[in-house]
Each structure stands twice: as C-alpha cells, then as structure tokens.
Amino acid sequence: MQTEKFIEILDSDFFTGVPDSTLKPLYDYLLERYGETKRHMIAANEGNAAALAAGYYLSTGKYPVVYMQNSGIGNMINPAASLLNERVCKIPVIFVVGWRGEPGTADEPQHAFQGLVTQTLLHDVEIPTYVVDKETQEDELRTQRAEAGKYLAKGRSVAFVIKKGGLSYHGKKPDYGNIFSLNREWVIERLTETIAGNLVVSTTGKISRELYEVRERKKQGHERDFLTVGAMGHCSSLALSVALHNPQRQVWCLDGDGAMLMHMGALAVIGNRKPENLIHVVFNNEAHESVGGAPTVAGTVDLPGVARACGYPKVLTVCSAEDLGGFLETAAERTLTFCEIRVAAVSRKDLGRPKTGAVQMRKDFQESLSGWYDKKPVTKNKGV
Ligand SMILES: Cc1ncc(C[n+]2csc(CCOP(=O)(O)OP(=O)(O)O)c2C)c(N)n1
C-alpha cells in the first residue's frame, strides 16, 4: 500500500509517534510533508505520543494518529487504559503499529514475545485491530477505515497493525544526518580497549550490535556485556543496579540519545544514588539511527546539563578523537560520570546481529559477575 494513499484513507491531519523500521515509509513521508511541526511531532516515547494525541483531540475534536513499533505498546497502554478508554475520558485515537516479530516470520529475540501478543494486548485494552500487509488493497482499507470510524465515533481507539512491507513510499525522502563526524562504531572500538575487564550494559539498537561486532573482531569474548536488546530507554537503570550490586567492578553504560530521552527520569535516580563505579556514555547522533534515521529532539537539548542537574558529579562532551583521548585518560577515576559523545548518524550497511541467544547472553553475563552464584542464598534454585 502506498503511504500517501494510506494516510489519505486514515483521514487525519495530526500525527505523532516514535519511529519504527517497519513504518519508515510512513515517517519519511510525514517528515517530508509536514516536517516537525504541530501537525507532526516525534515523541519521546509512545505514551508521550498518546498524550499528545489526546491534547489534539481535546482541542479540535478530530481524530489523531499515533504511530509506533509494537515494542512501544507497553509505554502506550498506560494512557490507553487510564485516559483514552471509554470508561474514562472516551478519547479516540487511530494507532498505527509496526508489527515486528509477527509469528511465523524470522526476527530478533526481543521481538518474539511482543510479536506474539501484539493483537492480544491491543484487544485487552479494547482497541480493535485491522491488519495491513503487502496485499491489502485500497478498497479493503477503505472498508476497514469505515468500520473503524464507527468505533472512533463512540470514543473508542482503533489500531492498524502493519506487517513488514505493508507500506511503501517512493517520493522524496528527508535528508537525515547531523554535523558530527565521529563514527560510533570506531568510538566503541576505542572504548573497548579502555573498558577491557569492565562490565558493559548497552542499549537497544545498533549500539549493541556494533559492540557485539567489535568484540567478535577483537576476539574479546562477550561475557562481560549485557546487550539490552529490548526495553528501550531502560539500559541505564539496569546498569545502575548492576553498578550498585557490584561495587568492585566498573560498569559502563552505552546509551543512545533516543533511549535516554525515552525514559529520562532514570538519570534523576542515577544522580541521586551516585554510584562511583558507573560511567554513563550517551552516543548523541540526534537521531533514531537504528530504525532509519528520523530525528530525536536531542539536537535542542543540553543532555550534559540534564545529567548535571540530576546530580552526576562529572559531566563532559566529546566531539573529536582528541576529546575522546582526554576522556579515556580520566575514565579510571572513581566517580559517577556522564559522557555525551557527539557522533555521525550513520552505521555500516553490513552490520551483523548478535549470534548469542538472549538467555545465553544473560547467563554468560551473570557468570562473569565474580561470585554471582556465591552471593545467592543457598536454595535449590541456582538460576535458570
Ligand atoms: C519502546 C520502543 N519503542 C521503539 C522502539 C524501536 N527502536 C529501536 S532502536 C530505536 C532508536 C534508538 O535511538 P537511539 O537511542 O538514539 O540510538 P541510535 O539508534 O541512534 O543508535 C527505536 C525507536 C523500541 N525498540 N522500543
């Protein structure tokens, strides 16, 4: 289905959401047509988008569109259940949900369960679903939209669930990118030389994939790395807890700007605890590069300033190889550190994917925490 036609049939003039690779044709088109304006806003997370949509409905009485990957359903369910639902405020929203991990298709481990329960979760919060795939014809979609219209008129939300390849867009594409030249994978390679025996907790998307590839290339082993492949925005909280419970080890958190913005409250908790063995690195490329490059709002946010205000005692920004060298020289200091690294919004076309399964990765990481099993109370359960 052509995105232009899809949008015409949805019949809305307000769009907000979080980018998803399945929906790249949709946000390419929206950014080209509306840019980032009050008609089209890229939100920090999917719950944030649902609330923006609610504000639009309150102000105009017209139906807003929220687009997102199915991974974001959890973020969206809070406002869907406790604000939009017909037993609460009856605010109708048209959701457009990219279906990763569709049963029967090959996808990454973090999408398997979410893909399985996508429609169930939406139905649980009383959102009827309409599936759109490569074969969906214009007439069919018009019929679906007409049926959805009956729910919307009663204050119910609806969701169009888009399978891989369900939307296409061949028009002019936005020019994604930023002014920075440091290459993220190159920086990760430099970091791993310093990180050596330390623990690493990395974020969702290509940062984890690049870390994995660097470790492979350098034959360093993966057991000290926890790749937070799902749960976008939560890797810094996970890293905080690992740091607090392993005070003898230095913990590096490799985060993205989109992920940091998604759950920025995590920084306030980290700044409050101040673990002196945690280094929080945020690769700021001002983009959701992993899912096609759409911008985040990080270009207008002073991320180090946020960290400072949250209580991180050491805060710095790296924009060049020279800055990076300076940062790495002081990285052994025992003090909670926030380091923003400004990088280009690019990655290798042939970037691989982790070959270690998620459970194996988790077990290897646990075993690398020295004495992990000893610290556990003696029970029959020695971990699964
Ligand atoms: C809750 C949730 N929403 C959306 C996604 C889809 N997603 C995966 S990676 C990513 C972009 C991450 O951006 P950033 O943290 O800036 O890192 P970059 O990709 O630029 O390295 C998105 C939106 C997701 N995995 N989870």
Image: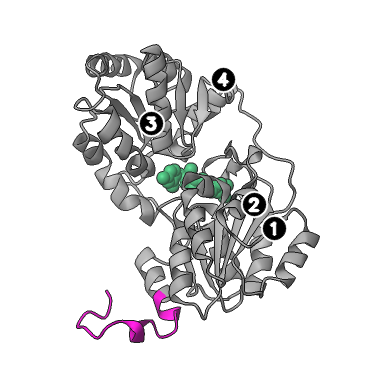
Q: Quadrant of residue 293?
A: top right
- Point out the tag, 1 or 4, that comes first from the N-terminus: 4
x then y, percent, for residue 43 = 49, 34
Q: From this viewpoint, is residue 104 visible? A: no
Q: CA distance from mark 3 to mark 1?
A: 34 Å
Identified by mark 2, the residue type is Pro
Q: CA distance from mark 3 to mark 4?
A: 19 Å
Question: Cβ–Cβ below 8 Å for labels 2 and 1?
Answer: yes
Q: Can you tell which of label 3 and label 1 is closer to the viewer? A: 1
Magenta-tinted stretch: 366-384
Q: Which residue is mark 1?
A: 316
Q: Which residue is mark 3?
A: 50
Q: Which residue is mark 2?
A: 304
Q: CA distance from mark 2 to mark 3?
A: 28 Å
Q: Can you tell which of label 3 and label 4 is closer to the viewer? A: 3
Callout 3: helix, strand or loop? helix
- Point out the tag, 4 or 2, that comes first from the N-terminus: 4
Q: Which mark is residue 34?
A: 4
Q: Quadrant of residue 61?
A: top left
Question: Cβ–Cβ below 8 Å for labels 2 and 3?
Answer: no
x then y, percent, for residue 286 = 62, 42
Q: Residues within 10 Å of mark 2 (few under 14, many from 20)?
A: some
- Point out the tag, 2 or 3, that comes first from the N-terminus: 3
- Point out the tag, 2 or 1, that comes first from the N-terminus: 2
Q: CA distance from mark 1 to mark 4?
A: 35 Å
Question: Cβ–Cβ below 8 Å for labels 3 and 4?
Answer: no
